[in-house]
Image (tube, grey):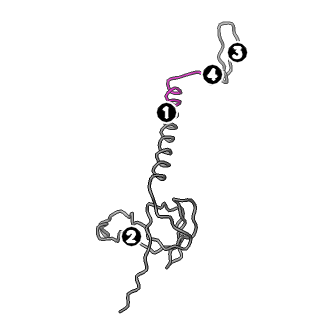
C-alpha cells in the first residue's frame, strides 16, 4: 500500500520508518533506561568484587560449595548441610570464578563464584 500526498507524489513505507510514534518513543526510552540500569549494575558488581577480600584458590585446592537448594516437604532446608563437597579447583577462570570437579563422582561444575566457596580442611582423626 502506497501513500500519496496532494500532488500525487508516491511515498514509500521506508520513508515512514523514522516517524516518531508514542510506542516508538516509549520503546526508545525504555531501552535507554535498561542500558543505564545495566551499566549501573555492572559498575556495582565491579566495585563489590574489588572491595571484598576473598581468599583466592589455586588449581588443585579442595573447596566446599554453599548449599542453595530450596526446601521441599520431603527435604526441609533446615535439616540439610550448609556446605557440600569436597571439590577440586580444576581451572581458575578469573580472580572470582572457578571451574570445579567433584572429588568422588568426577562431575564438573563450571563458572562458580568465589562467594559460594570456602576452603576444605582435611580431618585426619586417629582412633
Dot 2 or dot 1: first in sequence order is: 1
Disc 2 versus disc 4: distance between alpha carbons?
60 Å
**Viewed as shown, does residue 25 lie left or right of 70?**
right
What residue is shown with label 2? 83
Give the residue furthest to the right: 9
Position of residue 88 measured from the top left corner of the image (x, y, whole percent): 52, 73
Magenta highlight range: 19-29
**Viewed as shown, does residue 70 lie left or right of 29?**
left
**Residue, x 33% and y 70% (percent of image)?**
80
Dot 1 or dot 3: first in sequence order is: 3
**Residue, x 46% and y 45% (percent of image)?**
44
Between 39 and 7, which is closer to the camera in this rendering?
Answer: 39
Q: Say which mark, if any, is on residue 30.
A: 1
Disc 1 versus disc 3: distance between alpha carbons?
34 Å
What residue is shown with label 4? 16
Position of 43 relative to 68 (above/below): above
Question: Do callouts 1 and 3 mark residues in contact (Cβ within 8 Å)?
Answer: no
Disc 2 versus disc 3: distance between alpha carbons?
71 Å
Q: Say which mark, if any, is on residue 10.
A: 3
Mark 1 Cα shell of 10 Å, populated few (<14), some (14-19), many (≥20)? few
Amino acid at each position: 500500500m502506497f501513500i500519496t500526498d496532494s500532488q500525487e507524489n508516491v511515498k514509500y513505507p521506508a520513508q515512514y520508518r523514522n516517524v516518531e510514534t508514542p510506542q516508538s518513543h516509549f520503546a526508545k526510552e525504555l531501552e535507554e533506561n535498561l542500558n543505564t540500569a545495566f551499566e549501573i549494575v555492572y559498575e556495582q558488581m565491579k566495585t563489590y568484587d574489588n572491595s571484598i577480600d576473598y581468599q583466592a584458590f589455586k588449581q588443585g585446592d579442595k573447596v566446599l560449595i554453599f548449599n542453595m537448594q530450596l526446601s521441599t516437604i520431603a527435604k526441609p532446608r533446615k535439616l540439610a548441610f550448609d556446605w557440600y563437597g569436597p571439590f577440586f579447583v580444576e581451572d581458575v577462570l578469573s580472580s572470582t570464578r572457578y571451574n570445579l570437579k567433584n572429588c568422588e563422582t568426577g562431575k564438573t561444575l563450571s563458572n562458580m563464584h568465589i562467594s559460594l566457596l570456602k576452603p576444605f580442611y582435611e580431618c585426619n582423626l586417629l582412633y
